[in-house]
Every structure is written in structure tokens, then in C-alpha cells.
Amino acid sequence: MCTQHEEEDRSTLNGNGSTSNGNTKASSRHPTNSKMNGDGDGDIGDGLPDWENIELPPDHILSHLTDAHCHPTDLTHAPEVYDAVSLGGLASMATIVDDQDRVRALSEEKRWYSARDKGKGKEGRGVGVVACFGYHPWFTHHYTLSSGSSLPSKEDHYTSLFLPPNSLPTSKNHQLLLQLLPYLPDPIPFEGLLDKLRADMVRSKDSGRLTMLGEVGLDGSARMRWPKKARHLHPDYRDEVNLEDGNQDGEGEEWKRLTPFKVPMAHQRAILEAQMEIAIDLGMNVSLHSVSCAGPTLDTLIGMRDKHGMSFTNRINVDLHSAGGWSPPFWTQAERNLLNLYASPSIFITGRSPSASQLIKSISPERILVESDSHDVRLSSRLVWAAAEWVSRCKGWKLEGRDGNAEEWDMWDDGETEEFDENGNVREDGKGEVWTVRTLERNWATFMGLIDD
Ligand SMILES: [Zn+2]
């Protein structure tokens, strides 16, 4: 279990809430609407599928799908758990310092080579893992961009991030920050982490494994978690308002409160850009987090496009993971500006937005992927299948298994242009039908550069 994630209110921010024993609170956060779910009379609408009760297709259909964004190393999964995953692949994200080696180890165990003839999974069988290295925006306050003799003191680091330049020492936030300071970690020079990031990515790529930068990005709403060791300073604790709740686990493992402190976008953006420079230099794709800051995200991506030109747009692809709250018109604008931008809806995050179905409709057929964003691997197949079903509902596409077409197939034998025309648009078959899993499979292969677009 990643204690850093426990520090942050992950369950609130990713809507996941699953725990190490596999229980999940997600259903209560994502009540399914029976009206939206359809009632079996053929009109299934475009609502969110009931992922917990959804009927799974035969395993061979699931094996054509990849979970484009998940966090399996947040939990300790027994090897059999991975053996039971029916999906073809998982893109396993790293978020903090400790994750980087966990992701590398998992990707070495469940190999997925870019060369098709080298195989995938453990001993060539089962789910393959894409190694994704990177530093998540929720934790950027841990890092300083200074180095060597200019390293700031702990106090200077946190006050410069969290307080306005002219903050009065008597102000409430100033007082609070000084109170919490002894419980905050020393700032880590990001320079050293970037060196390791580059080394991890080069090593993974040179060994022929599928590799990405992720999870990186920007978050306009994330606030620093109240340090657990300073819980006695929290008003709730002192007033004993929620003492019973906080004490449920004896040591207060579940005790989660947020401080008022947000990391400035400029700092987040500098951390993101430094990592993206490495991805662009190495020609590696990016899994991008963007919550409550669609504008700054697009600015950053367009800045990269203008700086690097085709080295960015024609060499690497970016997956906007869960498309956190992006409006459909904004997505359409972004997609036009960035020919290398994809999006992967998830049930947990994308499903929260009231305009999510419209967003899915607005994503070009050849730019859409699917993901779980789960850290519980046992849920991945179900969540990815539900996302695929949701895409099929929104797009009006046929779904393998549900609508027939349940026989085995091999994308590589089907011919490279069968489903896409010369402009990269999905080519409908003679009956005007687009098949969801085949389209998502081909999109993933194009995104990762496994086939030419
Ligand atoms: Zn994530």
C-alpha cells in the first residue's frame, strides 16, 4: 500500500475508494441511474453502465482491450491476481518516488515488448504491463526546482509555494503553515528525480518494453493533505467533532483531512514540463492528468507543440486520462490543435461529469481509448469493459459479444487499413457498422506506435 496516497485524499480525487481488501465505496459515489441504464427494451441510451453488475464477455474479447491508465502498484497484489486479468494489457502508472521501482519490477515480470514476436505477459502469456514512470501533480509540493547551494530551507520552500509573497506572519494561513512545518518532509531536489526518471525510461525502452511517461499533469483543485502526525492540531480533532470517525482504526489510518494549501500552477507546470521534455527527447508517450485546469493544460501542450514541432506532434502521443471535467467544445478545440492528443474515459472519474456522455461523443473515433484508473487489479477487467460498453452506447457502435461478432479475431491478420481510411477515420463496414472493441484495440495500437496510423 502506498502510504503517500493515503496521505492524500485519493478516494475523493479519483472516485475510487477501493481498499486493500477489495471492498469498494465507488458504487455509492457513482450511483447508477436506472433510467440511464436502459431497461432491456433495446434503448440503452448513453448513460453510465452499472459496472459492478455488468455481464463480462468471453475472455478472448477482453484480451483485445488495454487498460490505458491504472495504479496496480498502489496495492500489493498476489501474482495470481495478475494471472486472473483477462485484459490484454495494463498501463501501470507511477506517481511518487517509491512507485518508480515498483512499476519497473512489475513491467519486468509481466513483460510487454514493442516487437510483437517477443511476446507479452509472464513467459509470453497473459496480461502485459506498460511501464509508466513519472511524478503526479498531487505531490509536487514535495519537490524543489532549486539544486546545489541554492537549495531552500524547508520553511522557505513551503512558504514560497503556499503563501502569497507579502503574507503577514500574523495571517491565519501563515500561522497554520508554521504550525504544520515540523511535520512536513524536507523538499526533495527534483533534478535528481529527473535523472532517475530518464534512466528508468531509457532502460525500459532499451530493453524493448512498452514505456510511457505517467502519471504527470496539472490539478487546479488538489490541496495538500493535513499531515497525519499533526492531526492533533486539526480543529476537528481538537474539538473532538469527528473523533469517533478518526479513531475507528485505532491508529487513525483512515483519518484524512485537507489543508487549505494549493500548489501554484506555475510550480506544477514547471514540474510537468521538465518531465515532458524527457518524454519528447526519448520519443515516449504521456499519460496526462488534468483536473480543474483545462486551460493551463492546453496552454502547456500547445507550448510543447510550438517549441518542439513535429518532434512532439508526430513522434509522441498524449493520452488525456479520464479527461477530468473537460467540456465537449473544449475537447474538440484541443483535438483540432493537437493531432497527437487522445482521451481515455473511465467509469470512476469521467463518469462523474454531467457532460461525460457528450464528451465521449465529441472525441474522434480514432482518438478514444479506455481505462479504469483503479488501483485494484481485480476490478480492471470489469471497469474497462464497462468503459467500452459506455463508449459503444455514446457512439452508437456495435459491441463485440453483446451484438454478435463474438468469434476470435486477430487484428494483425485483418489488414492494416480495414477499419480506417486514408485520413485515419474509422471506416464503416458495408453495413455501416463500427465495432467497439476492434476500434479501441486499433486505437491503442496506433497510440503506442505498434502500427502506423
Ligand atoms: Zn491515475
Image (tube, rainbow, N blue to C red):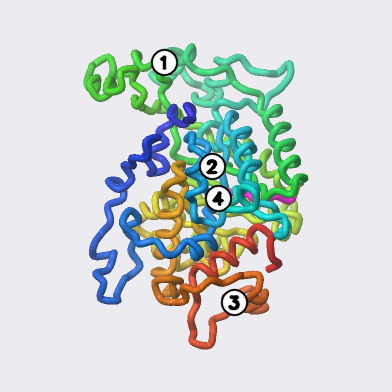
Q: Does the residue labelled 4 lie within 8 Å of ligand 1?
A: no
Question: Between tags 2 and 1, which lies in front?
Answer: 1
User: Which of marks 3 and 2 precedes in the sequence?
Assistant: 2
User: Which of marks 1 and 2 precedes in the sequence?
Assistant: 2
Between 414 and 369, the one lying in front of the other is 414
Residue at 38% in and 44% down: 15
Q: Is residue 306 left or right of residue 418?
A: right
Question: Between tags 2 and 3, which lies in front?
Answer: 3
Q: Do the residues labelled 4 and 2 touch (CB within 8 Å)?
A: no
Residue receiving disc 1: 229
Between 216 and 104, the one lying in front of the other is 104
Q: Which quadrant would the C terminus be assigned to in this image?
A: bottom right
Residue receiving disc 4: 90
Badge 3 crowding class, 10 Å Cα cut-off, few under 14, some 14 to 19, many 20 or more, is some
**In the rendered image, the vertical position of residue 403 relative to residue 437, given as above or below:** below
Kind of residue at badge 2: Leu
Secondary element under disc 4, as helix, strand or loop, is strand
Q: Does the residue labelled 2 lie within 8 Å of ligand 1?
A: no
**CA–CA distance in space, label 4 to label 1:** 35 Å
Secondary element under disc 3, as helix, strand or loop, is loop
**CA–CA distance in space, label 1 to label 3:** 56 Å
Q: Does the magenta stretch include residue 2?
A: no
**CA–CA distance in space, label 4 to label 3:** 24 Å
**CA–CA distance in space, label 4 to label 2:** 23 Å
Kind of residue at badge 1: Lys
